[in-house]
Image (spheres, grey):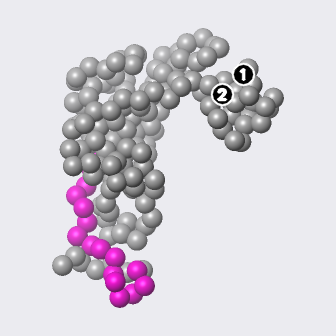
Amino acid sequence: MKRVFAIKPAYDCIKVQPCVHGSERCKPGTGGCGISAEKWVYSVVSDDGRFALALTVKSGRYLFSEQKKAEGASLQTHIAYAETREQVNEAMFNCDLLPGGKCRGGTVCLAADDFFKQHGADQKEQSDEFWSAMEVLLTEWVEPETEYERCKHCDGTGTVKKP
């Protein structure tokens, strides 16, 4: 599996104007975007690029305030195919993690902090054991592709078994 690490910079649109991260909804002087700690995003992507798991960690590192301990914020699956019959007709989302650029997925938050507390360290660099635990979790969470596809004879609203 491919291991990917990315950083989303901290921002403070209350003390710093104009908005430092480029949001169009943040109006100067309003602090509309608020503040955010630096975020660390750890991702594992399957060898065939069809599914991935991303853990976002709030680093606790802010621009102008006391540093806090890092904590898991979310775990998100990215899947390039339908896992269930119900998903066959659902729209896919833009995805910058999978090679095809589109995915389905789900997000959980409580499990993210539990996972990070159990396997992570309060630093950007993580151990091989951490990455291995991410890979195991990905294989446990992802289901195989469904045996159904969109029906070609009913305006795309129904599903049939694949030939």
Q: Residue at x 35, y 88 (%)?
A: 153
Please tell me the numbered disc located at residue 16. 1
**Outermost residue, right direction?**
29
Q: Which residue sits at x=34%, y=83%?
A: 152
Q: Is residue 29 left or right of residue 59?
A: right
Position of residue 22 measured from the top left corner of the image (x, y, whole percent): 64, 35
| Identity of the residue drawn at 34% across and 76% down | 150
Up-down relation of residue 54 to residue 5 (above or below): below
Q: Is residue 127 left or right of residue 16?
A: left
Determine if the magenta segment contains residue 35.
Answer: no
Residue 151 position, x and y percent, is: 33, 81
Is the Cβ of the residue at disc 1 closer than 8 Å to that at disc 2?
yes
**Residue 131 higher or lower than 146, as above or below:** above
Query: Which stretch is magenta?
Result: 140-156
Disc 1 is placed on an element classified as loop
Relative image position of residue 117 (x, y in whole percent): 37, 23
Q: Nearer the viewer, residue 144 or 114?
A: 144
Which part of the image, by quadrant, shows the C terminus?
bottom left
Q: Which mark is residue 20?
A: 2
**Distance in Å between CA atoms under marks 1 and 2:** 7 Å
Count neighbours of disc 1 (C-alpha within 10 A) and say few if under 14, some if 14 to 19, many if 20 or more: some
Amino acid type at mark 1? Val
Q: Indicate the position of residue 52 as horizontal and vertical percent values.
A: 31, 44
Residue type of the residue flagged with mark 2: Val
Does the magenta segment cover residue 155?
A: yes
